[in-house]
Image (cartoon, helix red, strand yellow):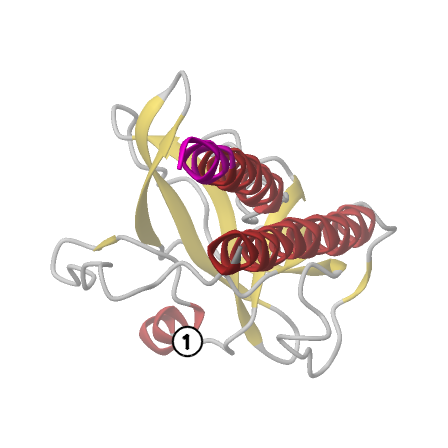
Amino acid sequence: MKRIIFFVVFGLGGLSILVSLGIWQMQRLAWKQAIITQIEERIVEAPIALPANPNRVDDKYLSVTAEGFVNPEFLRVLVSQKRIGAGYKLISPLVLQDRTVLLDRGFISVNDTLPTDITAQVRSVVTGNLHWPQEIDSYTPAPDIAKNIWFARDVDAMAKILKTDPVMIVLREISPADTNVTPLPVDTVNIPNDHLQYAITWFLLALIWSAMTAYFLLRNDSNTTET
């Protein structure tokens, strides 16, 4: 009898823990989906003038517009696009009236000729979103400054190299058009949201745990009866 009680208590305890973890992940899923929805709504809001001192937390994804000169200098960030292949994101200085910021102009294939027709004499109106990407971890290679190849967008490091403020606008539209580069506007595709998979895993483990507990109880009951 004590053995049966032990299996019942142990089984119910483990089951309650696994189920609670699954429920917690479902709650996290709802929380993350709400955040993603807020970000998606913010991305497409009517653009406002670039704030004087944007905050990288409060103003992330803020839709902005600015007018200035796109400096012909650029940094190349190695990326890959589906159905297109490898290419570069081009990051250039955007010279405004009172300061200079970074402009993520978009994508160009490695097979295309690097643009040379943009000059600081053409005034451009840009619309995009403020962004401070978190793309760097311990596995990210250091940029090859000599070859001008970066492996992630590091706003602070790029701003230092290009002598700009540590502020980046990811381009959605530019006038006049930059025909050599395809804008890659910010989106929520790369925001991790694996909570549903985690919840399913915990619930499946709870089901397996229940089956194993029932098996041991039935086996123990059978052995007791035979005895």
Location of residue 194 in the rendering, given as x and y in whole percent from the top left corner:
55, 44
Tell me residue 93's x, y (percent). Answer: 47, 63
Q: Which residue is situated farthest in the right direction here?
A: 46
Q: Is residue 218 above or below residue 150?
A: above
For the point 14% across and 53% down, the residue is: 147
Residue extending furthest toward the left: 146
The residue under label 1 is 156
User: In the image, which residues are magenta?
Assistant: 218-227
Residue at 82% x, 55% y is: 47
Decide if residue 128 is in sight here: no
Badge 1 marks a residue whose secondary structure is helix
Q: Single out the residue that lies furthest toward the top.
A: 83
Main SS, magenta region, reads helix
- Residue at the extreme front of the image, as rendered: 227
Tell me if residue 78 comes above or below residue 223 in the rendering: below
Residue 113: x and y in percent read 28, 29
Residue sitting at 57 percent across and 50 percent down? 122
Out of 70 and 213, give the one closest to the viewer. Answer: 213
In percent of the image, x 54 and y 70: which residue is there? 101
Q: Residues within 10 Å of mark 1 (few under 14, many from 20)?
A: some
Does the magenta portion include 134?
A: no
- Residue 154 x, y percent position in the rendering: 38, 66
Q: Is 221 part of what is drawn in magenta?
A: yes
Q: In the rendered image, which quarter is residue 96 located in?
A: bottom right
